[in-house]
Structures are given as C-alpha cells and as structure tokens.
C-alpha cells in the first residue's frame, strides 16, 4: 500500500499498517499504542502460537509431563488438563517449543527434530501473515474497528522471497497494508547481542541459512558432532550471524514495498496523530528522495 503523498495518507478513512524489523525496535510498542486509540491489533506471533502451533506446543508439554510418573497416570486417565497460556506479552510457550539444537544433556534437541519444528514454524508464520486480510475484515465486521495494525515477527524477512515479484506473502501485505520497516541502529544491534548473550532464546532461521550456519559453526569448533554442540553457544553465535543476514532483507522489503522509519523516532510517538504525522512525513520524504 503506497501513497502519492502524506496528505493522501491523512485523508484515508481507514488505516492498515504492518510494522516489521528486529526485536526491540518498537513494533509492539507502536501496535499497543494504536490499540489504545481504537485500532485492532493483530500479533503474528500470537496467531502462530494459538491457531497454527497450539497443538504442537501442548503436545510437547504432554510429552514432558508423561516423563513424570505422577503426572503420567493423571494424563492417561484424563484427570488433568494441560494447555498453553500464551499471550501478546508472553510468547514463552512458542519459544520453548522451538528449542535450541545441540546436546540434550545441556537442554538441546536433536538437529533433525529442530529442523522439523523450524519447518512447522515457517508454515505457521506464512499462514498467519496470509490471514491479515481476513482479520482486517473481521475487525470491521465483528468489532467495528476501522483501523488495523499488524505486529509482525522479526522473522518476516525469512519466510518471503524479496526477489520474487509474485511472492504471495509480500503481495498480500503490500496490497492490504502499509508496510513500515522500523530500522534499528548499530548501538541497538550491539545491545541485542549483549542481551542475547545473557539470555539466549530460540530463534527462527531460513532453512538454507540454518543448514549453512550449522555446518560452519561445527567446523569452526573443530568439527563437532551434532550431539556435542552446546545449544546456548550456538544460539548466541547464530544470533549474531542472523542480525547481519536480516538487515539487508528488511531494507529490500521496505525499498520495494513500503517505507522506513527510524527506531529513534518511536519514543516521540505518543498518540495516533503523532504516528500518522510521522508516516505522512516519511511518505513525502520518500517521494522527494
């Protein structure tokens, strides 16, 4: 969704925006602010974790519970109920299911199982992104929301082919929403790496990128076997590789389909009007450039 001018954006009777970018740049902050101003907030990660990965997540909980004799008997007799309490603010059940590859003794999962779960996540994310037009209509029809904001996951750039002009996800998002890349800074990237070093967490990787980096990591560590990889060490190393890999992909998506705002601009956005004015200036700036 491109605009001939900032004025054209301001005059739109109904707005639909998709924010994308790395973790911590302000996607969820802006989406939450707009929700408070009567916009429908659609979280891609929440949709993944509930609609498309919910059963996988709960089945994994049950597998772990079956290892405990006391819980095993209760589960087999349908005496207890296990569910995921995922929310916009707490996506831990989804992250826990994805896991980290490497030594099971160190909390990892076999690489083949890790790749299987990654493939499940890929399909779930694609489906959740293709659901955007449906939710724009549902938001209007059921809840009478005129405006819509999509808080996409950091891995949006991993499930699309920006070089394919017919990529279904990018075509869908670009036709129905204004794509807005929130660009981070070098300082923010360093902060993300340091934070990740302290608290490594599961991530989604494009399969070709994952296979290449898994082999590269093991070779750099002296030719490790899969089962000898320290999950947290690979997670930290892989995250740094991922940052460098994703940045040009985000830039390309914004260049071909949308617009760029800077993460330094996010703290100054305190209202719907502030955001629309920022986006209008961005549109005018892009046309002038």
Image (cartoon, helix red, strand yellow):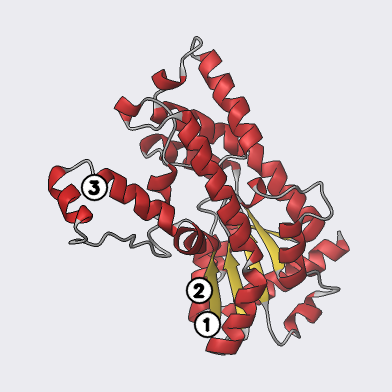
Q: Are dots 2 and 1 in contact, CB under 8 Å? A: yes
Residue visible at 71% across and 65% down in the picture: 173
Q: Residues within 10 Å of mark 1 (few under 14, many from 20)?
A: few
Where the N terminus falls, by quadrant?
bottom right
Where residue 109 appears, x then y in whole percent? 40, 32
Label 2 and label 3: CA atoms lie apart by 39 Å
Residue holding disc 1: 37
Rendered image: mark on residue 33: 2
Q: In the structure shown, which secondary structural element does the residue marked by tag 3 occupy?
A: helix
Q: Is residue 252 above or below residue 20?
A: above
Write down the quadrant of residue 278 in the picture: bottom right
The outermost residue toward the left is 70
Q: Would residue 225 be found to the left or right of residue 271 on screen?
A: left
Rendered image: mark on residue 217: none
Label 2 and label 1: CA atoms lie apart by 7 Å
Towards the viewer: 216 or 265:
216
Towards the viewer: 287 or 13:
13
Where residue 139 appears, x then y in whole percent? 57, 82
Q: Is residue 88 above or below residue 244?
A: below
**Earlier along the polypeptide chain: callout 2 or callout 3?**
2
Work out whether residue 20 can be spotted: no
Write down the quadrant of residue 107 in the picture: top left
Where the C terminus falls, by quadrant?
bottom right
Label 3 and label 1: CA atoms lie apart by 42 Å
The outermost residue toward the top is 222
Rendered image: mark on residue 65: 3
Q: Would residue 128 be found to the left or right of residue 11 on screen?
A: left
């Amino acid at each position: 969704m491109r605009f001939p001018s900032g004025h054209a954006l301001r005059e739109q009777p109904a707005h639909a925006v998709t924010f994308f970018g790395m973790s911590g740049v302000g996607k969820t902050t802006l989406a939450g602010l707009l929700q408070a101003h009567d916009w429908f907030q659609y979280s891609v990660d929440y949709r993944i974790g509930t609609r498309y990965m919910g059963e996988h997540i709960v089945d994994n909980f049950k597998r772990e519970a079956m290892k405990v004799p006391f819980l095993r008997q209760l589960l087999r007799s349908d005496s207890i109920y296990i569910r995921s309490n995922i929310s916009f603010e707490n996506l831990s059940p989804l992250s826990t299911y994805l896991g980290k590859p490497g030594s099971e003794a160190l909390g990892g999962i076999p690489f083949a199982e890790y790749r299987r779960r990654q493939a499940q996540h890929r399909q779930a994310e694609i489906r959740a992104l293709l659901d955007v037009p449906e939710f724009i209509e549902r938001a209007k029809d059921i809840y009478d929301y005129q405006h819509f904001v999509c808080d996409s996951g950091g891995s949006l750039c991993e499930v699309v082919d920006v070089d394919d002009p017919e990529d279904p996800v990018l075509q869908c998002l670009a036709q129905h929403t204004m794509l807005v890349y929130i660009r981070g800074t070098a300082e923010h990237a360093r902060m993300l790496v340091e934070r990740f070093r302290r608290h490594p967490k599961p991530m989604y990787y494009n399969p070709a990128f994952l296979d290449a980096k898994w082999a590269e990591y093991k070779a750099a560590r002296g030719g490790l076997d899969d089962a000898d990889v320290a999950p947290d060490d690979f997670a930290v190393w892989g995250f740094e590789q991922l940052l460098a890999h994703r940045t040009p992909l985000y830039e390309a998506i914004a260049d071909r389909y949308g617009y760029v705002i800077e993460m330094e601009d996010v703290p100054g956005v305190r209202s719907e009007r502030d955001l629309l004015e920022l986006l209008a200036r961005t549109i005018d700036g892009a046309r002038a450039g």
